[in-house]
Image (spheres, rainbow, N blue to C red):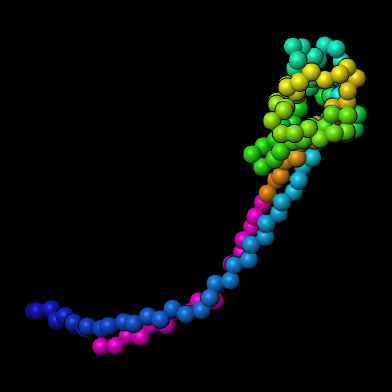
Amino acid sequence: MSIIRIYLEAEADSVVSGNIAITTNINVTPIVNRYTAVVVLGNILGGVTTIPAQNFTNDSGTSVAANSLVVPTSNGYYNVFVNGTLQRGGLTTLSPTNLIINTGLLVGATVVIEVINFNTSASSTSVNNVTVTTTISD
């Protein structure tokens, strides 16, 4: 007995139409840390002022622990004020352990550090209104 096979040939055309709507929400949240210290004689050496982290207090008046100054992330920056005057960039170096000011300040000068970091988050949703129509012809 032989096997009978059916052979069909068809062509198909597909049309895709519609749209996809995407909504994106971006949130940027600043996180601000401020520290205050008064320059003492031991901070000044060789024309450079170095103020250790533990000499600073935060906005609530609490002493900062050693190695605990917040430094800017890649999404942040910091400002330094001496006696209320904003200092130009490049004059200071901030690390978790200390603030280095590349000049000798006067004993009793008030130094304020303002560190601003930005947290960002984004979320997207999409609505698919796409239809596919396929026509098969033989």
Figure check: 106 above or below 62: above
Q: Please, what is the dominant secondary structure of the magenta stretch?
A: strand
The stretch in magenta equals: 121-138
Does the segment drawn in magenta span residue 45?
A: no
Q: At which x and y percent is residue 93?
A: 70, 26
Taking the spot 16% from the left edge, 80% from the top edge, the residue there is 5
Q: Magenta span has 127?
A: yes
Task: State the residue at coordinates (25%, 88%).
Answer: 138
Residue 20's x, y, as percent? 54, 72
| In this rendering, position of residue 42 left or right of residue 12 | right
| Of 92 and 72, the residue lying toward us | 92
On the question of residue 50 being in view, the answer is no
Residue occupying the point 64% across, 57% down? 123
* Residue 8 percent coordinates (x, y): 21, 83
In the displayed structure image, the side of residue 72 where residue 42 appears, left or right: right
Q: Residue furthest left?
A: 1
Screen quadrant of the N terminus: bottom left
Give the camera-side residue of 3 and 73: 73
